[in-house]
Image: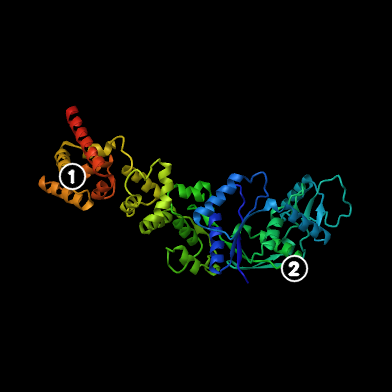
Amino acid sequence: MTKRTRFAPSPTGYLHIGGARTALFSWLYARRHGGQFVLRIEDTDLERSTAESVNAILEGMTWLGLDYDEGPFFQTHRFDRYEKVIQQLLDEGKAYRCYCSKTRLEALREQQMANKQKPRYDGLCIDRQEQPDDQPYVIRFRNPQSGQVVVNDLVRGQIVFENSELDDLIIARSDGSPTYNLTVVVDDLDMKLSHVIRGDDHLNNTPRQINILKALGAEPPLYAHVPMILGADGKRLSKRHGAVSVMQYRDEGYLPEALLNYLVRLGWSHGDEEVFDIEQLIELFDLDAVNRSASTFNPDKLLWLNQHYIKSGSPEHIARHLSWHLGQRDIDPANGPDILDVIRAQQERARTLVEMADNSRIFYQDYEDFDDKAARKNLKLSARDGLARLVERLADCDWQAEVIHAEIVATAEELDLKLGKVAQPLRVAVTGGGISPPIDVTLELIGRERSLAGMQRALAYIDQREQQA
């Protein structure tokens, strides 16, 4: 049997972390087994669904590299199909019109709750013969009143639901529009899905959907309900826990492979291994290794993974993702050293691409002013001789990191100073601040002209401070 999975988000917001993990698990399972991965947009909530949300979902999928084989399919394009299925269920006596008013249903619910009963429809209209034309109605599915629904969940194991506990759920609203539990069943059937992998918040829908599928004479797919993701406080992950949008992690400087690696470990494991590239995940992932218990989101672990991927990634790959961040800062990497060299100089230290982009500015743009704290600490009278000697030494030397380093060491020895007493004032002079890659590499990348200009500027700063003292 060909394995066919799907990701079916509702376009009522961004692609969040929980949805991205569901998409990843479904994508990996299809790729592992040589199957197909389908993208479906469940946009029947016309009041809340927006084109912006659809674009946000598609953008997030693209950034993560979760390519789909079919779709995106939109439920709003399939209303004719849903109407035919609803009519089929009516014609076969497997659904019925319910004329109960909202007031009656609310009173029924209050009475049941007062009697400590499970709120559910009481079936008043199930055999109603009178069907007035001028009275609004919904359509309910006639759920079996006896027997059981057995779900052999691929994550949670066997789960048994009593049909007597299930409601005659509404499958068409009073305006004729289909409801979620009807549309998802028809879509899963028509798209020939073999496996439905989704969050365990959908578990209560599963027996109802299985009963509808059986009423249509269809074999249900296999289900896998993955546990939720929790915040550090033990509550379900939400906006209050910080960044939960996939694209927000892009904006904060995370590489997609770091986020994918982290997401797959939220609920799946392979021994004690922590780091996996996408090819390894496709080879290793399977549903029998998905945990049953909820996972806790740990931002520090994600940051550690991101630093690992920045450090070990190819400069060419990092450049593709860094480019967006440089553009956000009006940094044009064509106006300066090769961006690949700039990346190599920073890979050991950068934790995020935001850090790397911010720290790359010195290689492409002149600083406006010295960082006050760094200047006061390092651009003192005691640093003047070292800077002045370096101006002379570096004016005509070969502009290579090794040569620059030798000249800095020679200057420190000549003045009987520790290397840091020469190198750190030099760093502040050429970058405007106290942090950069190794100073010899920094100077090589910034270039002779801009480096010497910064050093002259630092000398003038020192002289001005002395005059004001």
Mark 1 is surrounded, within 10 Å at the Cα level, by few (under 14), some (14 to 19) or many (20 or more) other residues, namely some
For this orientation, the residue located farthest to the right is: 130
User: Where is residue 456 shown, x and y percent of the image?
Assistant: 21, 36
Residue tagged 1: 394
The disc labelled 1 sits on which kind of residue?
Leu
User: Where is residue 107 shown, x and y percent of the image?
Assistant: 77, 47
Please tell me which of labels 1 and 2 falls first in the chain: 2
| 279 and 275: which is toward the camera | 279
At 63% across and 46% down in the image, what residue appears?
Answer: 49
| 218 and 129: which is toward the camera | 218
Residue tagged 2: 147
| 113 and 419: which is toward the camera | 419
Q: Secondary structure at mark 2?
A: loop
Mark 1 or mark 2, whichever is nearer to me: 1
Question: Which quadrant of the view contains residue 369?
Answer: top left
How far separated are the C-alphas under marks 1 and 2?
88 Å
Q: Quadrant of the N terminus?
A: bottom right
In this rendering, does residue 152 appear at all?
A: yes
User: Where is residue 367 shown, x and y percent of the image?
Assistant: 31, 37
At 33% across and 42% down in the image, what residue appears?
Answer: 364
User: Where is residue 351 shown, x and y percent of the image?
Assistant: 37, 52
The disc labelled 2 sits on which kind of residue?
Gly
Which of the colour schemes (rainbow, by chain, secondary structure, one colour) is used?
Answer: rainbow
